[in-house]
Amino acid sequence: MKGLDRNALEQVAEYFQSLAEPTRLCLLNALRNGEMTVSELAEGAESTPANVSKHLSLLAKTGFVERRTQGTSAYYRITDPDIYALCDLVCGQIAKRLSAQAEAHNAFKKAARRA
């Protein structure tokens, strides 16, 4: 972020804001396997097609996904697979934090049993 002006920082914030919703993360994760229709994505996300379409529209606006129409179906795909490197990095950090918390909790329980 070093050297970015206010406009660029606002774009960075918008980028991260797009990822700050569990349904959108679920959709991005589902698209790891390739193109999917709104109906397929809605089923996998346990959501309605209308809700999924709303989230996909925002993801398309911020450049995460791209839409392709074939007949009456709309197919979505990831435009930049590098998003998964970012998601994997964040998920790895969260997993480390949760593991450390679990270890601390277990150590506390052992100490309490001894007391």
Image (cartoon, rainbow, N blue to C red):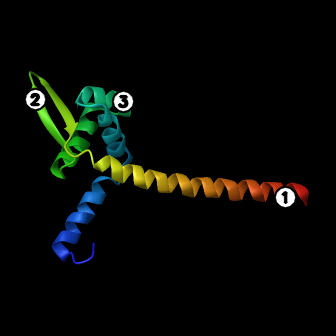
In the rendered view, would you say 11 is above or below 103? below
Count of labels in the image: 3
First reached walking from the N terminus: tag 2 or tag 3: 3
Query: Where does label 1 land, which residue?
Result: 112
Disc 2 to disc 1, C-alpha distance? 61 Å
In the rendered view, would you say 4 is above or below 28? below
Three-letter residue code for mark 2: Thr
Three-letter residue code for mark 1: Ala
Q: Which mark is residue 69?
A: 2
Q: Residue at x 24, y 64 (%)?
A: 12
First reached walking from the N terminus: tag 2 or tag 1: 2
Kindly state the secondary structure of the residue where label 2 is placed: strand
Furthest-right residue in this view: 115
| 73 and 36: which is toward the camera | 36
Q: Quadrant of the N terminus?
A: bottom left
Q: Quadrant of the C terminus?
A: bottom right
- In which quarter of the view is residue 67 placed? top left
Task: Indicate the position of residue 99 as horizontal and vertical percent values.
Answer: 61, 53
Q: Residue at x 58, y 54 (%)?
A: 98
| 29 and 73: which is toward the camera | 29
Kindly state the secondary structure of the residue where label 3 is placed: helix
Kindly state the secondary structure of the residue where label 1 is placed: helix
1 and 3 marks in contact (CB < 8 Å)? no
Query: Where does label 3 land, which residue?
Result: 44
Task: Indicate the position of residue 47 as horizontal and vertical percent values.
Answer: 34, 34
2 and 3 marks in contact (CB < 8 Å)? no
